[in-house]
């Protein structure tokens, strides 16, 4: 059986201030580094044989903290959803600039696509082939350092549900998900949202 660990990057200025980052590069915050160092303690007993990482800075920095002397493979398929003209903007700005778009998002967040952005269906179409390739591979312990939207897409695929149905799962920055199995059968064995002291 293969053990796959899905790790969302740590906190950033975007997650702390509430703006859309998407494909925009933002580094980890101090809080994010502290959170990932806690995850590192959890993973220290795991002999990872392969590390796959999104090309964005926040995931690269997360991987560097987990495996500072290790090497990893950069995979374009597992970067975050692109939010188009919404990137870099907070809700307050969007409500003033594009109230109708915000209304549509709130009514159906998993079906609305920001102008110039990527639909969740498009994210699924790049993430699912990546996942199928991964689970078809040899038995090994793999760490995938990625984003909330990608983890949510993998859950939707495994459960064979609409993405909206995955909103009952909490995937905070630094969440660690363990999945065991192979191409024909997978089980989610753990979802760990690591806590960090307020302000730290």
Image: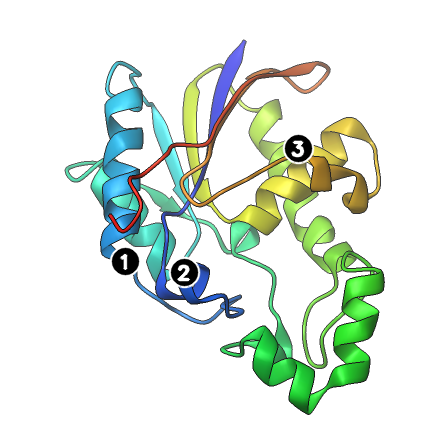
189, above or below 151, in the image: above
Circles 2 and 3: CB atoms closer than 8 Å: no
Left or right: 66 as drawn, with respect to 183: left
Left or right: 36 as drawn, with respect to 188: left
The part of the image, by quadrant, that contains residue 73 is top left
Q: Which mark is residue 48?
A: none
| Residue at 74%, 64% in the rendered image | 119
The answer to whether any part of residue 75 appears in the image is: yes
The part of the image, by quadrant, that contains residue 162 is top right
In percent of width and height, residue 118 lies at 69, 68
| Residue at 67%, 74% in the rendered image | 117
CA distance for labels 1 and 3: 33 Å
Q: Which corner quadrant holds the N terminus?
A: top right
Q: Which mark is residue 29?
A: 1
Kindly report which numbered mark, 1 or 3, lies closer to the viewer in this rendering: 1
112, above or below 161, in the image: below
Q: Residue furthest top?
A: 1
| Residue at 32%, 41% in the rendered image | 72
CA distance for labels 2 and 3: 33 Å
Residue to which mark 2 is pinned: 16
Answer with mark 2 or mark 3, whichever residue precedes in sequence: 2
Answer with mark 1 or mark 2, whichever residue precedes in sequence: 2
> SS class of the residue under badge 2?
helix
């Amino acid at each position: 059986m293969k053990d796959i660990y899905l790790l969302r990057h740590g906190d950033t200025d975007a997650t702390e201030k509430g703006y859309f980052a998407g494909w925009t590069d933002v580094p980890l915050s101090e809080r994010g580094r502290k959170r990932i160092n806690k995850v590192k303690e959890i993973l220290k007993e795991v002999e990872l044989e392969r590390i796959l990482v999104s090309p964005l800075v926040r995931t690269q920095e997360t991987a560097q903290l987990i495996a500072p002397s290790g090497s990893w493979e950069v995979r374009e398929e597992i970067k975050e959803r692109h939010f188009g003209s919404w990137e870099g903007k907070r809700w307050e700005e969007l409500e003033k600039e594009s109230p109708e778009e915000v209304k549509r998002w709130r009514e159906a967040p998993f079906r609305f696509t920001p102008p110039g952005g990527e639909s969740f269906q498009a994210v699924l179409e790049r993430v699912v082939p990546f996942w199928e390739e991964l689970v078809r591979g040899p038995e090994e312990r793999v760490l995938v350092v990625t984003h909330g939207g990608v983890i949510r897409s993998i859950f939707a695929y495994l459960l064979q549900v609409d993405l909206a149905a995955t909103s009952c799962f909490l995937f905070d920055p630094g969440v660690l998900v363990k999945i065991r199995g192979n191409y024909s059968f997978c089980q989610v064995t753990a979802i760990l949202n690591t806590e960090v002291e307020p302000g730290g």
